[in-house]
Every structure is written in structure tokens, then in C-alpha cells.
Image (cartoon, grey):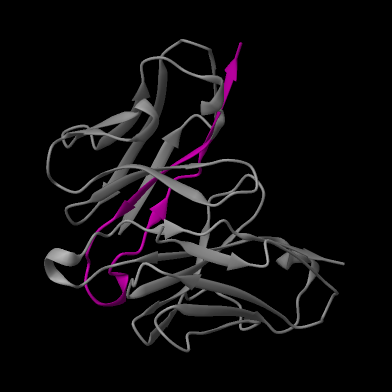
Amino acid sequence: DAMVIQNPRYQVTQFGKPVTLSCSQTLNHNVMYWYQQKSSQAPKLLFHYYDKDFNNEADTPDNFQSRRPNTSFCFLDIRSPGLGDAAMYLCATSRVGQGSGSSYEQYFGPGTRLTVT
Amino acid sequence: AQSVTQLGSHVSVSEGALVLLRCNYSSSVPPYLFWYVQYPNQGLQLLLKYTSAATLVKGINGFEAEFKKSETSFHLTKPSAHMSDAAEYFCAVSGYAGGTSYGKLTFGQGTILTVHP
């Protein structure tokens, strides 16, 4: 089945120690998104890639970076995690801007729960 | 600009009772509207979507929603609640407004549905 995969599902890191979260997709979607979701809150968009074009949200801290080496993979790098960065990180994909092939809905992975100690 | 308001952060129903989760939206462009469900420690799963076709949309797990432009509403209903419906539900709006806003979702704050036996 086509899907969005996130690894690892649970990640524990130390305060200030860089961490990378991984997302891959088999849907061949052109847009990939990273969200941060804290307890009892809606997902908050950090940034997205429209094909190779990186789009950062205005309020995303510089501590968060992303890479998309190819269509299938996207990474979230947290350079110096703080206690406030503990959250669920969700990757999503969609197919937009492709005429009749556009669907607009986003497909989410299962998330990575990040704990900062 | 787009926004979504979900009325009621918590809704509690008895098993077998009607489920009604309310969502009102604001959008400066013709909207695409979505309902997502999230189970604990999981990603978001698409329940249903409205993309300017039929105003009554049927989704998975017996849920449906009706788009009412005059009321700017997209309420989610299910005739008979099941214990497995207990989860958090998010209403979201998307709409093309040019540039990098293509495909971006704006979420409501979520409604936690509790189902009592």
C-alpha cells in the first residue's frame, strides 16, 4: 500500500544534542510537509517542500531545518533541541499544482514522538 | 486569509447516539474542507473531504459532512456512535491563494470525542 513512513516512531534526545527525524513516501506526491504537534493542540506547520522549493513558515525557529534529497525522502533536523521542542512531529504529503492530478488533501505519517531529557 | 473554528473542545455521547461535531470556516477563496481523525500517538487520518462537488460528503467509518456556504459550516455527523469513534477530530480548510500557500491546511483547534457505553 502507498503510504507515508516516519522513523523512528519514538526518539529520545538530550538537551542540545542534534537530532534528525526521517520521512519517506511511496505516493509520489510533489509536496511534503513537517508539522509540530504539542499535547491537546492542532498540528503547527513548520515548513514544506513544493517539489524542490523550500518554504519556511515565518514563525519557525532557526533551530529547525529540513532537507529533501529526492521526491521520496524528507528530513527534519533539530540543531539544538530544547525542552520546549518535545512534541509529536508529523510528516505529510500532498499532490498539488498538477491540474486534474491535484487532490489537495494531505496524507499523514504516524508521527515521531520526540522526548528531550 | 483562512481560519477554522470548531465549537466545543470536548464532546461526549453515549454509544449508539448521534455524533455532531461543529466546524465553521472563513476563507477568501473557494475552500476545500477536510475532516481528520487522530487516535492517541498516531498521525492524522482523512475522514472525508469537500472539493466543490456534492455538498453532502460521505466518508469512512460511517461519517458524513454537509457543506453549507450560507452558514460557512462543515459539520461532521454520524448517526450512531461506536466506542471505536473515541478520538480527536480536526476540521481543516485549504484553498489556493497563490504562490506557496498552495495546498496549505489551516486546522481548527480539535474536538475530543468521548463515547460512553
Toward which corner of the image does residue A112 lie, by quadrant? bottom right
- Residue lying at 30% horizontally and 29% vertically, measured from the top left: B64
Left or right: residue A81 versus residue A66 is: right
Which residue is rendered at x = 67% and y = 49% of the image? A39
Q: Position of residue A15 (x, y in %)?
A: 84, 75
B85 falls in the magenta region: no
Who is closer to the viewer here, B24 or A28? A28
Position above or below: B31 against B65: below
Please identify the quadrant where the C terminus of chain A is shown.
bottom right
Give the left or right position of residue A89, taking residue B57 as reference: right
Task: Tell me the quadrant of the picture where the N terminus of chain A can be found.
Answer: bottom left
> In the rendered image, which quarter is residue B114 located in?
top right
Image quadrant in which you'd find residue A22: bottom right
Residue B112 within the segment the image draws in magenta: yes
**Residue B22 % position (x, y):** 38, 30
| Residue nearest the viewer, comparing A94 with A1 | A1
**Which span is picked out in magenta?**
B88-117
Please name the residue shown 22% across and 32% down the image. B71
